Image (cartoon, grey):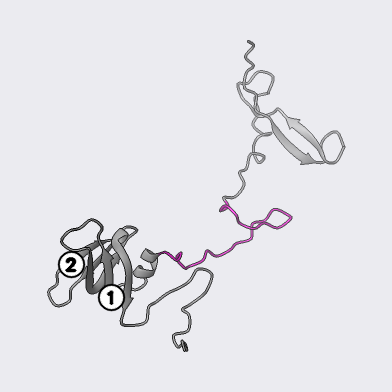
Amino acid sequence: MIVQPYRPVTYTIGNTSSGMPGMVHSTTQGMPGMPGMGNGTQGMQGMMSQPPQVTSGSPMTPAGAVVPTTAPVFEQSYIENILRLNLGKVGTFYMTFENNQEWNAKIFKGVLEAAGRDHIIISDPATGQRFLLLMINLDYATFDEPLTYQYPGTIGNPPTSRNFW
């Protein structure tokens, strides 16, 4: 097997020394220490620039300029995110526990302190006792006051007054 030495090449587009517009031209100047490539540095400077960092999916103009966009400021509609929007509110959490001989279902009422992907932390305002509840056991929750809720793709909260019947 023949191993060729590494020989970096830069390309310029446009008018070249050959006089043919649009032709790709190979520059071999500016590589000190490389055989057959010259010892100057003039050919590489100014040509080796990196494109700007762009977030994935950013729109671009036909000329290649990146159009700046603002990221949405809402969270996705998952239970833990909805609960996080309502920290500090009093809620009633209905839980079921399979294969439990003592109690199969239990109701917890308290101030919502934290919510994670797999847990809820509430506290009893009367005693100060805190409960760590697993999200897997949660059936549903009720609140005595309106919930703060922001559905993905909409700005603000939905109207609070609705006619149900």
Q: Quadrant of residue 132?
A: bottom left
What residue is shown at x 34% (from left), y 73% (from top)?
86
The stretch drawn in magenta includes residue 71: yes
Q: If you read the primary sequence from the N terminus, does the residue marked by circle 1 or circle 2 appear first?
A: 1
The one nearer the camera, 105 or 10, is: 105
User: Is residue 91 rendered to the left or right of residue 128?
Assistant: right
Picture coordinates of residue 140 (x, y %)? 33, 69
Above or below — where is 64 with respect to 81?
above
The stretch drawn in magenta includes residue 88: no
Residue type at mark 2 is: Arg
Q: Give the structural element (helix, strand or loop) at label 2.
A: strand
What residue is shown at x 60% (from left), y 21% (from top)?
33
Q: CA distance from mark 1 to mark 2?
A: 14 Å
What residue is shown at x 62% (from left), y 47% (from top)?
51
User: Is residue 24 rendered to the left or right of residue 36?
Assistant: right
Give the residues in magenta.
Answer: 54-78
Question: Which residue corresponds to mark 2?
Answer: 130
Picture coordinates of residue 5 (x, y %)? 62, 18
Are circles 1 and 2 on residues that touch, CB within 8 Å? Answer: no
User: Is residue 156 rendered to the left or right of residue 111?
Assistant: right
Crowding around mark 2 (Cα neighbors within 10 Å: few <14, some 14 to 19, many 20+) is some
Q: Which mark is residue 91?
A: 1
Kindly report the secondary structure that dominates the magenta region of the rendered protein.
Answer: loop
The one nearer the camera, 117 or 11, is: 117
The one nearer the camera, 13 or 155, is: 155
Residue extending furthest left?
A: 127
